[in-house]
Amino acid sequence: MTARLTVVATTDLHGQVRDFDYGTDAPYADVYGNGIGLARVASVVERIRADAPGALLVDAGDLLEGSALAHHYSGRLRDDDPPLHPMAAAMNYLRYDAVTLGNHELDYGVAALTRLREQLDAPLLAGNVRDAATGVPAFEGGLVRDVPLAGGAVVRVGIIGLTTPQVTTWNRDVAAQLRFDDLVTAAGPLVDDVRGRGADVVVAVVHSGIVEPATRENAAVALAREVSGIDVIVAGHAHVEVAEHRERGPDGRTVVLTEPLCWGMRVAVVELDLTVRGGRWCVLDSRARLVDTARSPEDPAVVSLVEPQHTHVRALGAQIVGHAVTAVDAEPARYRATDALALVARAQAEGARRRADADVPLISLVSPTSRHASIAVGPVRRRQVAALCTFDSGIVVVALDGRRLRAHLEHAAAFFHGVTTAGDHDPDTLTNAPTPRTPLGTPDFDYDVAYGIDAPVTYDIDLARPVGRRITGLSYDGASLADDQPLHVVVSRYRASGAAAYPDVAEAPVVHEVCDSLRTLVERYLAAGAAYASTHAHWRLVHAGTPLTVAPAG
């Protein structure tokens, strides 16, 4: 007797319900022709279910944070009686069987997450998360489903959920309430539990990516190699596209792994051919593939379901919040000084200045989070600020010194590939260099730039030199910056929590925290009509002291 079990999966949806870019107030478009959103995913799922009525639908996490739509309603989850979150509404309509906790589900606090759990019909799984005070599991770790197959047969499927233990790296406040255990260590007992409840097939849905070599953060491959009893791993978090990856588990079984692309651009489909041995189902063969959602229309039912929220957020985005005195173009911010980062740097620093020590130089660290945001001279709408400030993080001021700032900038300079000439260089081959921590390439938002607020911070990044020795000419107000010079440095809470493994900043004393979010600070700065031209952004890319020529293709 044989049968087929189908598992359908999404991950890293990041609040994308509609195929829409709220920053441009237009349908989403990129150079790759991708489509996004749960409305497109719904059309794919409906088609798959027509052929496989018993197909399981799972998600590997990071659904709350991302789009302007999700951001607005995720903030409302802090209310005593919040409206139904559009992501919960859409996922309930699609009838998800299980959702794994992602790190960004904690961005709005544990109370907001609790209300999301109440709104979701699907269980929110995270078997390696415990209450920090009591040590008891804070989430369900697994579940068992009796899944109907063609011909009237039924297979019992165990689904376990695990999340990257690095969550408190980015949301350190959560550590007071939740403890995150190593997911590979936690997986074994979860597998044993669902197998003990009669599961014939085990699917692990993990917010941890398919990255080699595996790390504690992205441990999906290690999970397959080290834990017995798993048949399928649906991975997320790394924002990579892996149709199918195979590993041999310690018990000899073949484990098939898959990771669909983020934002609903792809849907993973895993097919398991089953046979009966010793009176129980077992996997005879398996395969995985990815479906491109751009080829499927938006499901009208999902569009209608979130139309009021969609319309409301568009109206909020159209509100004029300030005035731009010079044009802003975010695209080149990753390879040269721009007004895009100068604006953000000055806005967050001015928000912090009220409690900063006037006798200590104030430095602002910012990173490029968007290549597409642009603002013309004149009125600025809220959606343009949201596009520029993709991550609406809180802000803190920490105490560093000249030596530690240099170390921070050296770490940032690993973002660039080494070069052998002064140019011309295409920025797409110059930036996003891989590191041991980021073997697939360093993302733009991991690269920090330093801005002096009351006087220029000046430095070169010499790409003829090895990583760790690239920063030359580091000066403040025209004088070489001494190692023991005290500094007050404005950074995002994300960076101050240790994100991107920068040295020193996570352990640095916090001078004070800024209550307002980054977008609020930028809106307030623009409303005041203040200047932000990058006259204080005296940093350059050089080769052996000669400025690099960077010429984007086309």
Image (tube, rainbow, N blue to C red):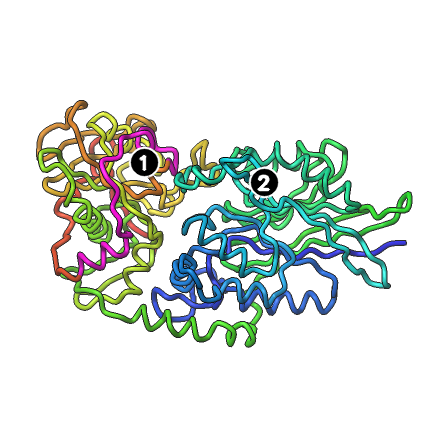
- 70 shown above or below 490: below
Q: Quadrant of the C terminus?
A: bottom left
Give the mark nearer the N terminus: 1 vs 2: 2
Taking 205 as reference, is 50 left or right?
A: right
Question: Is disc 1 surrounded by few (<14), some (14 to 19) or many (20+) residues within 10 Å?
Answer: many
| Residue 465 seen in the current view | yes
| Residue 464 seen in the current view | no
The residue singled out by tag 1 in the image is 412
The amino acid type, in three-letter code, at marker 1 is Ala
Image coords of residue 117 (percent x, y): 54, 55
- 443 shown above or below 151: above
Magenta stretch encompasses residue 148:
no
State the residue in front, 405 or 527. Answer: 527
Magenta stretch encompasses residue 503:
yes
- 366 shown above or below 476: below
Dots 1 and 2: beta carbons under 8 Å? Answer: no
